[in-house]
Amino acid sequence: MQEARYTLDDLLTLMQVLRDPQQGCPWDVAQHWDSIVPHTIEEAHEVADAIERRAFDELPGELGDLLFQIVYYAQFGREEGRFDFHDIVHVLTAKMITRHPHVFPDGHLGSRRQGVAAVDVDTSAVGQRWEARKVNERDSRAATSHLDDIPLALPALSRASKLSSRASRAGFDWPDHRGALDKIREELAELEVEIEAGHQENMNAELGDLLFAVVNLARHLEVDPEQALRGTGQRFERRFRHVEDAVRESGHPIEHTDLDTLECHWQEAKRIERGQ
């Protein structure tokens, strides 16, 4: 006999009970809009981590933890009479239908495109329409800048990429990647000047400018800078662990090993990755 499974309604009931001032959990009762935000960001990163590690057995739990954050906000909204979970579902569904006229031509969930398979739809045109509709939505909210509604809480590289993309769509951009490369060289030279001068505050600003210029280059090369850096971090970790293991086998602490030896082990790790 198959075990009965919990439903979304059960999850919403669970949250209501946890938040009940009399019978709920003291920790959950004490939470508020701002206190949950760090947990939401952390859970989103844990979902991304599970996917990158291809830990699909962990993914249902991680996705559940992320969904639980949305249920939290829905409960806050319900308690304050602002909105509830069903409002979230309705607004999301309506927005996605509006943004996909190539799928729902009559503007409702029951309509369907006829005669053209998804693989034959022009994806570039779809992307342009998607961005145009997002612009219209921002305009309807009395937006004053192309950079409105880019969340401050995004990871810095992701936010820089979005800022750069929005500015580009407004016409503030180089014709091709060569302009971005020249900007990187310019910013690097300015950073070197500040390093020589020893101006810590200026070094901080110039290093930020250099990183932003690199993000611009990534956009021109159609590379996601956040994913690129995460990939580099993972490669660095693998190679450094190899260095640690190699030094450990020699019986010497890594802190007392000369740099030439460490570099030799590092290059060996790179050769192993390349299958050489």
Image: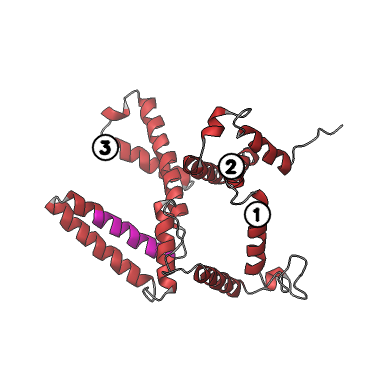
Residue 64 lies, in percent from the top left, at 63, 41
Nearest to the observer: residue 113 or residue 248: 113
Nearest to the observer: residue 185 or residue 84: 84
In the image, what residue type sits under mark 3? Leu
Q: Quadrant of residue 270?
A: top left
In the image, what residue type sits under mark 2? Tyr
Q: CA gap, disc 3 to disc 2?
A: 51 Å
Q: Is residue 65 magenta?
A: no
Residue 134 lies, in percent from the top left, at 54, 68
Q: Quadrant of residue 206?
A: bottom left
Q: Is residue 9 left or right of residue 3?
A: left
Q: Which mark is residue 72?
A: 2
Instruction: Report which residue position mark 3 lands on.
Output: 259
Mark 1 crowd level (few <14, some 14–19, many ≥20, 10 Å Cα): some
Mark 3 crowd level (few <14, some 14–19, many ≥20, 10 Å Cα): few
Q: In the image, which residues are magenta?
A: 205-219
Q: Nearer the viewer, mark 3 or mark 2?
A: 2
Q: CA gap, disc 1 to disc 2?
A: 14 Å
Residue 273 lies, in percent from the top left, at 47, 45
Report the residue at 49% width, 41% height from top: 42
Instruction: Report which residue position mark 1 lands on.
Output: 87
Q: Is residue 216 magenta?
A: yes
Q: Quadrant of residue 105?
A: bottom right
User: Residue extending furthest top?
Assistant: 251
Report the residue at 41% width, 54% height from top: 152
Nearest to N terminus: mark 1 or mark 2 = 2
Report the residue at 78% width, 66% height from top: 110
Mark 1 vs 2: CB contact within 8 A: no
Mark 1 vs 3: CB contact within 8 A: no
